[in-house]
Amino acid sequence: MNGRDSLSDGGLSELLREFKGERGELIPVLQRVQELHGYLRPEAIRRVSRWLKISENEIFGVATFYAQFRFHPPGRHRLRVCLGTACHVKGGEQILLTAQQRLSIGTGETTPDGEYDLDRVACLGCCALAPVVAVDDKVHSQMSVLKIQRILDEPKSA
Amino acid sequence: MNPRALDERRGKAASKWAELQSSPRPLIFIGAASCGLAAGAAEVQEAVEKYLRKNGIEGRIIQVGCIGPCYMEPLMDVRMPGQPRISYSNVRPSDVPLIMESFFEKKEVAKSRLAGHFGEAEFDGIPRFFDMPMLKPQVRIVLRNCGIIDPDDLDHYLARDGYLGLEKCLSLPWTEVLDTIKRSGLRGRGGAGFPTWRKWLTCREMPSDQRYLICNADEGDPGAFMNRSLIEGDPHAVLEGMLIAAFTIGATQGYVYIRAEYPLAIKRLKKAIAQMREAGLLGQNILGSEFSFDIRIKEGAGAFVCGEETALIASIEGKRGMPRSRPPFPAVSGLYGKPTIINNVETLGTLPHILRNGAEWYAGFGTETSKGTKTFSLVGKVRRTGLIEVPLGMTLREVVFDIGGGTLKPFKAVQTGGPSGGCLSEEFLDTPIDYEHLAGAGSIMGSGGLIVVDSDTCIVDTAKYFLGFTQMESCGKCVPCRVGTRHMVKLLEKICDGRGELADLEKLEKLGRTIKNGSLCQLGGTAPNPALTSLKYFRSEFISHVKDKRCPAVVCKSLVNYRVIAGKCTGCQRCVSVCPTGAITGPRSEPHNLDRTKCIKCRSCYEICRFDAIAGDAIIIES
């Protein structure tokens, strides 16, 4: 690989050097690619396909199976509403609905201004403080429909 | 590192620990597990740092794991020289200066937000932390270090008898280790409760050049967080357990399969593994023995079904995480076709204690068939939520009411075993918690999620929630699970929407039985449990939905309405300002009007009226 290549492929060549190129590394490779680009670009999947000698078809099959992988560019901030059991019985559904209303998007979507992604997640593991949401990596506990509105109304820096 | 070098290190660790216990510097402990951080532990720590800096106090801040009573988070402990460690609960950053001033300026124990002290003897009339109703009935074996030690410091673990279990194990032939585990009665803590030793023996007896050990930390059960807490609070206990298991089954390579949603646990594990490698506890010829072993971390990419053994293996191999039929069991043919043992985090975390203290000691806890202790995440509508560890055989009543403090509204049910388990009504409260009794009631032990619900929770809605979850997480390989769960969800939705008929209840039961019998793996095999147990124990609630078109718990949206009580409403307009659809109108100081055609039942007005408005409770939800 020469320098021009590693620039044009968004750092992929550099990244692939961390791995041996074995079949079993597919998921860790995709996780690292997503960490780098924010999502799985079609070009990146093509590149991984050639490198690991697994068809693009199969890679899409694996990637779409797992909730972690995304195929669209992410927004600047990521709002994850937890709908684990504890959050559900404490009103997590209402929190999600309010967030959808406030942002005018559905789950799995990004606001038109690219500010927020909205996702529902199965469990963030903070069940004793339910209901919880996570804005980027910060978990907010004991939410209410009013608290989520306040969080979304706060100005966010990029 | 040979055993002698470890002994030396342990000696140093012990004096380091002893010094810490009699430290001339003030120590501040912050409960900084994921739940503590979510409650604001980082902000509390900042406030402490600020105070110490401003006043030029040479204190030391130590981040510890979760000690269990999550409802008291953020927890902060202060240990002044010559005093026991004193714990403060629900600490807000604004409380910190007051607490600190009391200790450092007034030279007396701060009394606000006081929870208890960690000492053995009587101190200053303060209650003992471990005498609190939530903690007193507990027996902390697996969790003994959580919240006590710094999980990032191997010396803390060593000083509290860490890796003694491994040393004991390496001094014995594998057959004797296996026999110890057999006599201890330990059963898999992941849910199914299969005797650990039997699985191990099958694997060990398979002739093979390579065997694998996998630690299953893919805690997918929504509402359960025992494994996360244990790894965050005491990672070395789990890793020591892995060494013991690997030694016994003859594995040379291990994996920890952990959810990517647990970033802090992953960070702690990585650090602990690096420390082990440096101390010679991992790699070739561990502690100078013949035993060699290495551990790699595999981050799960988010699929509940990967908690199933064969699906987990497929995922590590880089494939879609779909289960395959068994036999052959993974113990015979698992990862890359080699004999593989998959043990749950808690099972592994228990092993060092059994090796160190003996099988008979461990078997002394629990019941005839379910030995030892089990951790549970006690959550939902219970007063005292958190992570607990109790001897098996304790009744649900003791757990929910004595430890959990009961519910605010009348108790309705306790759900055990997550999406694979069942909802047990009040009549089961005196059921002992063990594998057999819970199975007998139509539920399962599961990995340890205990979700308590009260009269404000709709059982039909909860059943719909669980089926919706398993339906989404179904891998799609076999028809009963893929199609069957979808139909069950549709029927439950129909009932919640008020379109249900009595015949639907029978359809649900018939479908449930078919899915249970016909599914390939235990995801499908247990998916109908929440609906089936609810239908059995809470049939009247289903009938209210179907016949009277009423939701007694006022939860199911299609069956409830919002109403402004004109006599109570002062017209403060708070609800008008939060209503996202403009359904509430009315001039200031006059009772407001709620337009039901516009109302989306989002609950905003209800909450603001309840907590923030002048009148309070002027908006009601009725069915």
Image (spheres, rainbow, N blue to C red):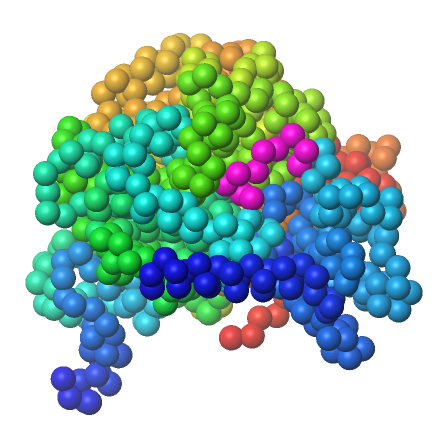
Residue depicted at 44% across the width and 10% down the height: B502
Place of residue B90 in the rendered image (x, y in percent of width and height, measured from the top left):
73, 51
What percent of the width, then of the height, locates residue B317?
18, 51
Nearer to me, B609 or B241: B241
Q: Is residue B142 magenta?
A: yes
Q: Is residue B509 visible?
A: yes
Res. B559 image quadrant = top right
Q: How many marks?
A: 0
Residue range highlighted in magenta: B135-144
Residue B279 higher or lower than B139, as above or below: below
Q: Name the residue at 50% across, 50% down.
A: B161
Against B419, is A109 above or below?
below
Front residue (pair B37, A3): B37
Q: Residue shown at 78%/59% (left/top)? A: B82
Query: Is B219 covered by the magenta stretch?
Result: no
Q: Could you say which is closer to the camera, residue B34 or residue B119? A: B119
B403 or B379, nearer to the observer = B403
In the image, taking residue B93 as reference, residue B104 lies left or right, namely right
